[in-house]
Amino acid sequence: MKFATILVAATMLGAAAAQAADTAILDRHVANMKSGNISGIVADYAPDAVIVTPAGMVTPGGVFVGKDVPKLFNVLAAPKNLPGNKTMQTSYEDLGSGATKMNWVQFKGSKDEVSGYDVFVVKGGKIAFQTVVVNAKK
């Protein structure tokens, strides 16, 4: 019985450590978005990462795969978007299986407020998948 308790505790600690590592990657992602550090942003993505954004937000289809990932962040972290990025506030929800929901808001409390969430899947210390959802304006 003691071994089972230790095994469960070790599993929970491992999951907590994995979640902490995932949120550390996401914290770095947000910091790099706020500073416009495109190479820093892209460094956290797997070479075959897939990002799905709302169609028309950046491109007509909204899907970026592998080598196209930098194209997305060249737009999202461009100087004209940095004022919004710098105001970004985030919180995380662990979804399990390496998935984390990052709730975000920019320009909170102003007429320009925009919010949404991204779901990230981190595998092997790299972001393998991300989807972006932008909430409808209030």
Image (cartoon, grey):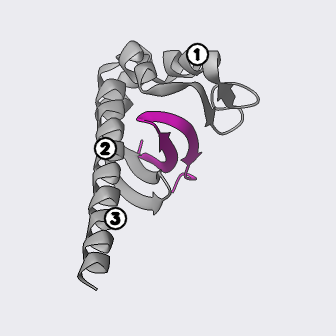
Proximity of marks 2 and 3: CB atoms separated by less than 8 Å: no
Q: Estimate the spatial distance between the alpha carbons at disc 2 and disc 3, rounded to whole Å.
A: 15 Å
For the residue marked with disc 2, what is the amino acid? Ala
Instruction: Give the image quarter of residue 63.
Output: top right
* Residue at the (66%, 39%) spot, across then down: 54
Could you say which disc has been placed on residue 21 in the image? 2
* Residue at the (76%, 30%) spot, across then down: 61
Boundaries of the magenta span: 112-138
Q: Position of residue 76 (x, y in %)?
A: 49, 24
Q: Position of residue 16 (x, y in %)?
A: 29, 58
Badge 2 marks a residue whose secondary structure is helix
Instruction: Quickly name the residue at label 3.
Output: 11
Q: Residues within 10 Å of mark 3 (few under 14, many from 20)?
A: few
Instruction: Quickly name the residue at label 1.
Output: 71
For the residue marked with disc 3, what is the amino acid? Thr
For the residue marked with disc 1, what is the amino acid? Lys
Task: Give the residue furthest to the bottom.
Answer: 1
Badge 3 marks a residue whose secondary structure is helix
- Comparing 50 with 47, the one in front is 47
Q: Residues within 10 Å of mark 2 (few under 14, many from 20)?
A: some
Residue 102 in view of the camera? yes
Q: Main secondary structure of the magenta part?
A: strand
Against 87, residue 13 (above or below) is below
Against 7, residue 62 (above or below) is above
